[in-house]
Amino acid sequence: MTSVALRSVGMYLPDREVPNAALRERFATTAPGVIDKLETASGIRTRWYAPEEWATSDLAVRAARQALDRAAVDPRDVDLIVLGTDSPDYVTPATSVVVQHKLGATRAGTFDVGCACASFPTALAAASSLAVVNGALRNVLVVGAYMMHKLADPDDPTTFFYGDGAGAVLLQPSEEAGILGVVFRADGAYARHWAIASGGTAEPATEAAVREGRTRVRMRERYPAEVNEDGWPDLVRRVCDQAGFAVDALDLVLFTQVRFATIERVMDRLGLPMRRTHTVMHKWGYTGSACLPMALDDALREGRVSAGDRVVMVGSGVGYNQAAVALRVTRSLAGAR
């Protein structure tokens, strides 16, 4: 067995900006004041959309290419692609195999992870574990990609949250310990709170389902605040304990980028100052399965972390699924810009 670490990070943000002002105008009559309330609660001020003819795989490929370019790795040398998303190109086949083809990673195996917005840390945990036990996996791409706005009802004001984007990391064997710990948390009792109800085997899509909006993502019942406000601190403490360091030794902790106020409350409960987290929802919107690698890329670019730093990423998705990964920033990752 060997250690594995993040060799590089990449991200992709599409070109079309949709600021909150555009949504205020759209919902001025049907939901007056709602956009202002959502902005105050979330901290989101804008989001970015890909061209309408694109699919999630098109975002993923661009982030993956950047991660590979930064590590000077040819796509043909990739051994495995693990894609985390809950806005796939198709119900089947897996979006990861579409990415493999578009990327030109001709000898890579692939699989998808579908844990909603906990998909990226779950995919990273799975991929790193596989790479540790299988020495033949020398270059493993882990991608988080999100295009939920295309699966939302444009007349539903909760479309406010959704921004398109993708982030990717390249895992390689390393003499420096990179991935230090992984933990999970879930509760399927909440599975129908926020969901696309129709289109799977529980309810195959029908004309009536389309007409009634059940093939669109929709919140049917609010999640209790405790799911994240209790769950995130628990995950951070558990993964730090597994990794062998105290919470106050953390240099950076990244959370699902959906509500700034929730992050403030969680950091306070952990006894950590806000300077030890990093947020991007204000400038990119909620990019779901992609937000953690995008935030990590941004933190590295802004010099928020450096070689040797301890980082925890916590992902939280509907279902609910939650996952946390502890990692150390290696010299190679810090230099891959």
Image: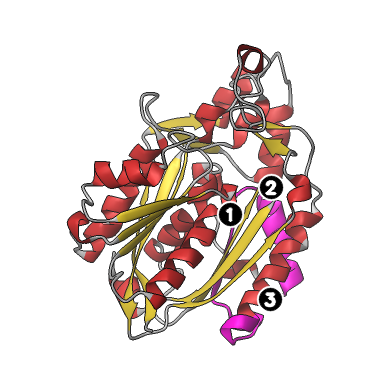
Residue 47 x %, y %: 50, 36
Mark 3: amino acid: Arg
Residue 278 x %, y %: 54, 61
Q: Locate residue 154: give its quadrant.
A: top right
Q: Which is nearer the N-term, disc 3 or disc 2?
A: 3
| Residue under the image location 62 percent in, 75 percent down | 239
Which residue, as the protein is rendered here, is positioned at the far front? Answer: 201
| Residue under the image location 29 percent in, 47 percent down | 100
Question: Residue 141, relative to residue 303: is it above or below?
Answer: above
Q: Which is nearer the N-term, disc 1 or disc 2?
A: 1
In the rendered structure, the answer to whether residue 67 lies left or right of residue 223 reads left
Question: Residue 184, relative to residue 154: is it above or below?
Answer: below
Q: Quote the CA–CA distance across marks 1 and 3.
A: 17 Å
| Residue under the image location 72 percent in, 28 percent down | 34
| Disc 3 target residue | 237
The residue tagged with tag 2: helix, strand or loop?
loop
The residue tagged with tag 1: helix, strand or loop?
helix
Q: Which residues are magenta?
A: 241-270
Q: How is the image coloured?
A: secondary structure
Q: Locate residue 156: give its quadrant.
A: top right
In this rendering, the label closer to the viewer, 3 or 2: 2
Q: Quote the CA–CA distance across marks 1 and 2.
A: 10 Å
Looking at the image, which is closer to me, 63 or 242? 242
| Disc 1 target residue | 118
Residue 49 x %, y %: 44, 32
